[in-house]
Image (tube, rainbow, N blue to C red):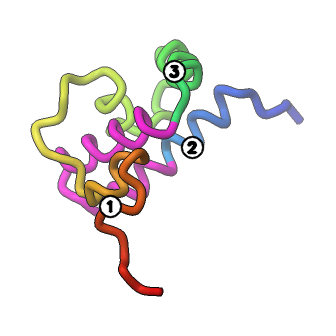
């Protein structure tokens, strides 16, 4: 049994993000993936995944590939502004409690 590598973990996480956003129209999904990865992943994590893309083939979701290598998506992320940018945490959040 082979050990799970760091790249395997990054591919799995990126694909999980893509799975979440697949319920949205394609351009919104790509924008959501791109913005999520930029907001919550370290530059080192992004660089490792980008460097591994050629050898990963179909293991990496096509939306993830577009989010990492494409231009700025034509649509906006479907995620609310308060959750799109972690620095805005609390802005627009529930007033319950």
Query: Could you tell me which secondary element the residue under label 2 belongs to?
Result: helix
N-term mark: 2 or 3: 2
Q: Is residue 73 left or right of residue 3?
A: left
On screen, residue 83 above or below 54 = below
**Residue at the image point whose x is 84% and y is 31% from the top:** 3
- Residue 11 picture location, percent across and down: 56, 35
Q: Which mark is residue 91?
A: 1
Is 37 one of the magenta-colored residues?
A: yes
**Residue at the image point whose x is 40% and y is 62% from the top:** 90
Disc 1 to disc 3: CB gap under 8 Å = no
Q: Residue furthest bottom?
A: 97
Q: Report the residue marked by disc 3.
A: 43
Q: Quadrant of residue 20?
A: bottom left
Q: Report the residue marked by disc 2.
A: 13
Q: CA distance from mark 2 to mark 3?
A: 15 Å
Numbered range of the magenta stretch = 16-40
* Quadrant of the drawing holding the N terminus: top right
């Amino acid at each position: 049994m082979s050990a799970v590598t760091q790249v395997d973990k990054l591919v799995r996480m990126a694909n999980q993000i893509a799975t979440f956003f697949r319920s949205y129209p394609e351009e919104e999904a790509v924008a959501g993936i791109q913005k999520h990865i930029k907001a919550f992943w370290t530059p080192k994590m992004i660089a490792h995944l980008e460097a591994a893309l050629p050898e990963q083939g179909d293991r990496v979701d096509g939306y993830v590939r577009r989010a990492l290598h494409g231009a700025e998506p034509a649509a906006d992320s479907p995620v609310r502004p308060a959750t799109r940018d972690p620095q805005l945490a609390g802005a627009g959040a529930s007033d319950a409690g």
